[in-house]
Amino acid sequence: MIKIAIASGKGGTGKTFIATNIFNILLQNNYAAMLVDCDAEEPNALAFFKAQLTGKKEVTQQIPVINTEICNFCGKCHEYCNYNAIFILPQMKIIKVIPDLCHGCGACSVACEFEAITEEPVSLGQVTTYSLKNTDCILEARMNIGVMSPVSVIKAAIKQINNKTDVAILDAPPGTSCPFIQTVATADYVILVTEPTPFGLSDLRQSVETLKKINKPCGVIINRAGLGNNDVSNYLFQEKIPLLLEIQFKKEIAGLYSRGKLLSESDSTFAEQLLTVVKNIITSHGNSSHQR
Amino acid sequence: MEIAVISGKGGTGKSTISAAFATLNGKVILADCDVDAANLYLLFNPSHKEEVIYIGGTKAEIDYSKCTNCRLCIGYCRFDAITDADDKVVISEILCDGCVLCSRICPEKAITMVANEKSRMFSGSFSNGEIVYGRLSPGEENTGKLVNMVREKAKQLSRETGIETIIIDGPPGIGCPVISSLTGTNKAVMVTEPTISGLNDLKRIRVLVKKFKLEEYVIINKSDLNDSMSSRIKKWCKENGITVAGTLPFDREIVDALVQGKSITELYPDSTTAKKIKKIWNKIINQKR
């Protein structure tokens, strides 16, 4: 199996556009492909497929429950908690858990010498499985609104990828912080999608530098080519980063996308170009020793 | 007055619109709270007055001269960050959450926490006021603390300079940094685009915004890319009692201005789009609840 992450520093450059089209082309060419929507804060990949819901898994985190009848307000759990999630006023015999700040690390349970702390699961989101033509092939990570970090839900979705998959396409969240890293860290190759504007270039640089640090091979697709300037192409040339594909800006493409339609269905040239890009990646980066 | 420009979906035009708002006429304080991908400073060439180190999370590191390979820490770590590799206990920097538990329970005191000091907050002046922005070091957890730091600095500058309007250019998504960008603000401006994703994401961010009881506005950017979807978004806004502050067409001049390092209101102040943005701004600024 090869895992290919579709990422970008800047939001809205076309990650989902590329991920959904690659997935579609792979299916049409009889690959056992899976699409994993890792943009758990705002998942959208499903809008492009008429898929059947086949499974749903809650993703939970353990939150401490403090039994105030046993607790002697010694404050050790508060001291152990590195996230300030335990509020304590010993003189007034008040102790409270602030669930929004808790990361579920379990340090407070370890700290408590009186067994006053138990833990209970709270929901962070869901991983749902969808099928196309009776084959489970889409996983969606969806964080509950109000939850602070999507990382646990993303990890849970990636864990559910079927081992028999040939190619797993991970639609990554924007940015270069934790959620992005958790997604790309599991991938064998990263396709960065950018646009030829100063904002696009600035965020691309940041993504490239981050991927270099964790030794991930990457290539770039320039979306909406023709809209901005040549600075992105020049940068790729200077840094010797492969330019995988340029997609010219057309209002019709934006229109198709807005209606939840896949360009690869109506534009065979585009479909072939994208298939070639993916085939090359599979040839050069598939069967890698990377495992997680 | 703090106005937060947010969107849920990335790339709908938050920064472009924030930049345009910031260069209309009145002086403003601009707080770029997309600390994961700060971009606004690229347009404004601010004079760098101040650079502050932000220390985010810490990561566990093993001192192998002390480690006896007892593997006790592996069982305690809930983030699967500690593994056994080639007869050696290894901590993954990527997976470590910085909870400190392994360091606390290690009988040999072989694990120490190392701070990441690569994140920064910058502030300086630009042609139309002051700008504050953060730059989160890659891979760092975006907890919203750096966002809070940027906003505190913006408020401090507001008091010092007497400039009352603070424009917050928010991050995409609905997680912690977005919550930090919204807390305590007066108005939320949700920028969307007429796509299925745009509407889906708008609905999700709205559930979050509603918790804050702010004045709410929606701007439909690139509205002519799909007119029927734009109408659907307007209808949804009406049903939910949200003011549509205005719509903006897809306009190449916006991108042209960006490429030249300017906002559209600076470079083409007399263009239709610039005039529309001005009208939207006035609506947001003046409307009382």
Image (spheres, rainbow, N blue to C red):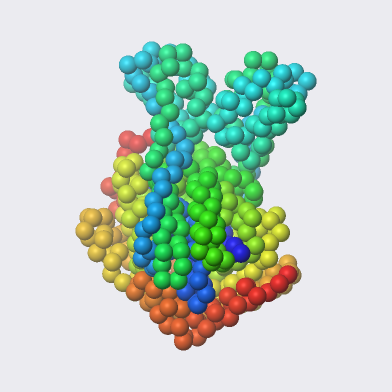
Q: Quadrant of residue A235?
A: bottom left
Quadrant for the C terminus of chain B in the image: bottom right
On screen, A167 above or below A231?
A: above
Instruction: Give the total of numbered labels.
Output: 0
Residue visible at 52% across and 83% down?
A: B275
The correct choice, above or below, for A126 with respect to B277 in the image is above
Q: Inspect this view and state whether residue B10 appears.
A: no
Q: Position of residue B18 (x, y in %)?
A: 50, 68
Query: Residue at position x 47%, y 22% from top?
Result: B103
Quadrant of the rendered structure where residue A288 is? top left
Foreground residue, A22 or B66? B66
Q: Nearer the viewer, residue B153 or B212?
A: B153
Nearest to the observer: residue A18 or residue B175: B175
Q: Quadrant of the N terminus of chain B?
A: bottom right
Q: Residue B20: x, y in percent?
A: 48, 73
- Residue A90 appears in view: yes
The x, y position of residue A114, in whole percent, is 68, 15
Relative image position of residue B173 (x, y in whole percent): 55, 55
For residue B165, side relative to residue B123 (left or right): right
Q: Please, is residue B260 above or below residue A19 in the view?
A: below
Residue B111 or residue B184, whichever sits in front: B184
Question: Which residue occupies 45% across, 30% down?
Answer: B81
In percent of the image, x 36 and y 58: which residue is there?
Answer: B48
